[in-house]
Amino acid sequence: MQRKKYGIQMESSYTPIYSSYYIEGINQLYEFDAGSLSGWMYSVNGWFPNYGVSEYTSLKNGDSISFSYTRNVGHDLGK
């Protein structure tokens, strides 16, 4: 699935085994563009959940969700 809103392109795909959507690319930067360990991760209030973003249902007013690009499976992001 590809979307474009507010001038930002995003592409995702559904992963049946996890019953969740996976973010493949944002603004033309895709998983594996920076090597075999690279891709998109998300965090909520600085915490990186271990499940897909579409499965996160606990957002509350004031929560902050961030999408970050990792080059090393999150190790470079402090995960």
Image: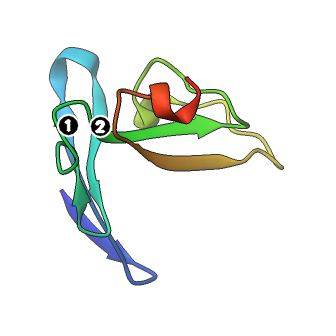
Q: Position of residue 76 (x, y in %)?
A: 48, 33
Toward the right, the furthest residue is 62
| Residue ID at (16%, 32%) | 36
Report the Cα–Cα distance between label 2 and label 1: 4 Å
Q: Which residue is mark 1?
A: 14
| Residue ID at (66%, 30%) | 58
**Amino acid type indicated by mark 1:** Tyr
Q: Residues within 10 Å of mark 2 (few under 14, many from 20)?
A: some
Residue 3, compared with residue 20, is above or below; it is: below
Mark 1 residue element: strand
Residue 26, compared with residue 32, is above or below; it is: below
Q: Which residue is mark 2?
A: 21
Residue 10, compared with residue 48, is above or below; it is: below
Q: Position of residue 4 (x, y in %)?
A: 31, 75
Quadrant location, the C terminus: top right
- In the shown orientation, is residue 76 left or right of residue 15? right
Decide which of 33, 3 is in the foreground and name it.
33
